[in-house]
């Protein structure tokens, strides 16, 4: 070993090939694992990921690449399968959830992969690992919407607006005079009610839903 | 001496018949079409992979060997309507436009072959909707000087010679959507051969092959693949064809270049679909008449794939060739000879 790493310098010129050190390595030093495949497989809609043979029919015909650069369902599957978690997170986490569920991929997949569902399962897998950081307004609204449906079985307009502003850290904005004026107008015109009714016995349903979604 | 009934006059049935006749058996060959030679004759195959030998050089001697042998009685345009009895005493009803006859046989060979997969159901490829999307079997016919275009590759839409040609592999094969999850076993070598034939005839043309794997396992196939890239500059892209559309009267294809991780779209003048092999109606009909087992895809199932590959599920009824699943001509000829030997040994006892 020592022989190889010792520098050989003749007349001030270094001859041993240490120049290699100036080039960034193209080798992927990432511990591979099938752990992630196992996880995605178990998520709702994720089971057919194992059938994929990487043909590229889904990505070749996908609606999105015209609008979203580098969106590639075949590659998402490949990265999960090979356990390239870092690449999945660093390069793809902002892409996976952009799928518009057009189902072209699923209808054409020659292997019977439910590609659209698998893409969603991969997004869920990343979400569970909290890689998305701060929520966008859309995502925050989606979350509150789902929470309220599960909790109460219905949407209470006043509550959802309040929770939305609170979740996105903008309660102050909600109390601005024009927002209050708008709220008042909607109340008097009957578009919103202060106290939405309750759904009878929803607690049990809610309990079941939560168990199911665990 | 017992007589053997051979059903199907493709290369397999022809080889089986002539081998049996050579061994001294009488043979009755029943073929539903009015010609011998099976798919090779039907689609006027011109040159065969991998040697680009004229198909006639292979198939004509096999046909002659049958036609010139007085031990073989050939019924064309006929079919077997009913079979009764058990080995080695079968009775078969043979029907054709002239009437019906009943004959006794000691054994039966089924060599009813395959049909080309019909790609109309793969709607995203536009076969049947876009005239210049054609099948590999249609290209075989075109490249034959005795064929409909006198050996010229022509766009069906306007009769022009296409300059840019794409070939989509695995059409109707390795595909659960159409219920054919198996590999067609000849599509890769046939497309490579056709690409070379096209480049030889039209050196200015460009040929792009979209594939998932190039399965070049046969004698000389891998070498042909190398030749296609090195000598003919045929471009092989790893990605299954995704869709074909018409943009300003021009065919346009989409696929993913999986090695580049990105979709590609480009225009072409013609698209050839490498349609695979499916079990033909003729095979299914024969299986029903004889009461022998088929597999999930309609092909005939051997009693044991390893130990008795040419025996059907019923004693005295033998199977060979592409009716058992996709098979190339070289192996069909081997199968024809093998089944003849098996029939002979079974009739000896
Ligand atoms: C596009 C294409 C190109 C090909 N090119 C090559 C090549 O270059 N080299 C190569 O090695 N292989 C090639 N092949 C494969 C080749 O076609 C097959 O290996 C060969 O045709 C199979 O022979 P067979 O006799 O088993 O079946 P077939 O050729 O299908 O013959 C079966 C015969 O049985 C008859 N028949 C069917 N049912 C009945 C019935 N119930 N009663 C009476 N008769 C019946 C049919 O009419 C037919 O004549 C190609 C295949 C395709 C799809
Ligand atoms: S079409 Fe199906 S098999 Fe092909 S890459 Fe996409 S998911 Fe995988
Ligand atoms: S469902 Fe999603 S992944 Fe599938 S084709 Fe549509 S946008 Fe692409
Ligand atoms: S032989 Fe080639 S074209 Fe045919 S199914 Fe197999 S891989 Fe596809």
Image (cartoon, coloured by chain):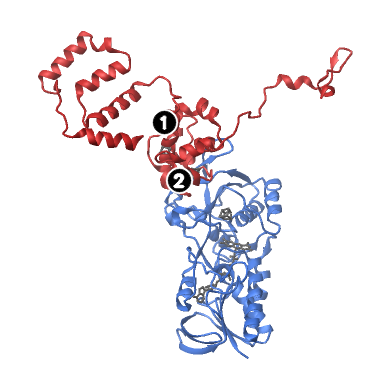
Chain colours: A red, B blue
Q: Mark 1 points at which residue?
A: A97
One can see residue B248 in this view:
no
Name the quadrant where ligand 1 sits: bottom right
Mark 1 surroundings within 10 Å by alpha-carbon count, few (fewer than 14), some (14 through 19), many (20 or more): some
Marker disc for residue B85: none
Q: As drawn, is B165 to the left or to the right of A157?
A: right
Secondary structure under badge 1?
loop
Q: Which of marks 1 and 2 is nearer the N terminus?
A: 1
Q: As drawn, is B73 to the left or to the right of B287?
A: right
Q: Residue at x 30, y 13 (%)?
A: A170
Could you confirm whether marks 1 and 2 are on the same chain? yes
Q: Which residue is drawn at 29% across and 36% down?
A: A209
Quadrant holding the N terminus of chain A: top right
For residue A112, above or below residue A67: below
**Closer to us: A47 or B211:** A47
Look at the numbered disc 1 and say if its residue's Cβ is closer than 8 Å to ligand 3.
Answer: no
In the rendering, at what x and y percent does residue A99 appear? 41, 34
Q: Which residue is drawn at 25% across and 29% down?
A: A151
Q: What's the CA distance linking mark 1 and mark 2? A: 18 Å
Q: As drawn, is B279 to the left or to the right of B215?
A: left
Secondary structure under badge 2?
loop
Marker disc for residue A113: 2
Circle 2 chain: A
């Amino acid at each position: 070993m020592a022989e190889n790493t010792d520098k050989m310098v003749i007349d001030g010129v270094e001859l041993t090939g240490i120049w290699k050190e100036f080039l960034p390595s193209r080798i992927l030093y990432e511990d591979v694992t099938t752990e992630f495949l196992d996880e995605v497989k178990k998520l709702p809609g994720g089971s057919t990921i194992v059938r994929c043979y990487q043909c590229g029919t889904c990505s070749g015909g996908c609606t999105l690449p015209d609008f979203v650069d580098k969106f590639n369902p075949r590659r998402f599957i490949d990265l999960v399968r090979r356990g390239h978690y870092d690449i999945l997170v660093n390069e793809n986490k902002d892409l996976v959830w952009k799928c518009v569920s057009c189902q072209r991929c699923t209808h054409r997949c020659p292997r019977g992969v439910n590609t659209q569902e698998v893409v969603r399962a991969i997004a869920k897998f990343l979400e569970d690992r909290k890689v998305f950081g701060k929520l966008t307004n859309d995502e925050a609204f989606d979350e509150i919407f789902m929470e309220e449906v599960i909790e109460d079985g219905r949407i209470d307009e006043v509550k959802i607006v309040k929770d939305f502003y609170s979740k996105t850290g903008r309660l102050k904005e909600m109390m601005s005079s024009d927002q209050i004026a708008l709220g008042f107008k909607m109340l008097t015109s009957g578009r919103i009610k202060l106290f939405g009714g309750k759904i009878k016995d929803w607690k049990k349903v809610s309990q079941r839903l939560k168990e199911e979604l665990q | 001496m017992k007589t053997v009934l051979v059903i199907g006059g493709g290369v397999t049935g022809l080889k089986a018949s002539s081998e049996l006749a050579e061994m001294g058996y009488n043979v009755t060959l029943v073929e539903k079409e009015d010609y011998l030679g099976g798919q090779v004759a039907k689609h006027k195959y011109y040159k065969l992979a991998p040697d680009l030998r004229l198909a006639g050089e292979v198939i004509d001697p096999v046909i002659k060997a049958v036609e010139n042998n007085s031990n073989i009685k050939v019924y064309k345009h006929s079919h077997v309507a009913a079979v009764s009895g058990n080995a080695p005493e079968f009775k078969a009803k043979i029907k054709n436009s002239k009437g019906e006859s009943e004959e006794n046989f000691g054994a039966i060979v089924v060599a009813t072959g395959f049909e080309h997969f019909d790609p109309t159901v793969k709607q995203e490829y536009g076969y049947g909707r876009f005239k210049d999307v054609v099948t590999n079997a249609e290209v075989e016919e075109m490249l034959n000087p005795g064929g409909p275009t006198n050996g010229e590759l022509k766009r069906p839409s306007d009769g022009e010679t296409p300059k840019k040609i794409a070939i989509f592999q695995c059409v109707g094969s390795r595909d659960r959507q159409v219920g054919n999850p198996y590999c067609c076993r000849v599509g890769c070598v046939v497309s490579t051969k056709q690409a070379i034939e096209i480049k030889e005839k039209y050196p200015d043309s460009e040929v792009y092959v979209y594939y998932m794997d190039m399965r070049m396992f046969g004698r000389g196939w891998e070498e042909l693949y190398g030749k296609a890239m090195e000598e003919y500059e045929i471009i092989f892209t790893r990605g299954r064809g995704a869709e074909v559309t018409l943009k300003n009267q021009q065919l346009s294809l989409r696929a993913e270049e999986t090695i580049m991780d990105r979709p590609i779209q480009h225009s072409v003048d013609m698209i050839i679909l490498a349609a695979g092999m499916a079990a033909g109606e003729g095979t299914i009909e024969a299986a029903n008449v004889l009461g022998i087992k088929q597999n999930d895809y309609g092909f005939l199932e051997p009693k044991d794939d390893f130990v008795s590959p040419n025996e059907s599920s019923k004693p005295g009824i033998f199977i060979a060739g592409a009716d058992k699943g996709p098979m190339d001509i070289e192996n069909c000829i081997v199968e024809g000879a093998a089944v003849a030997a098996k029939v002979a040994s079974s009739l000896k006892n």
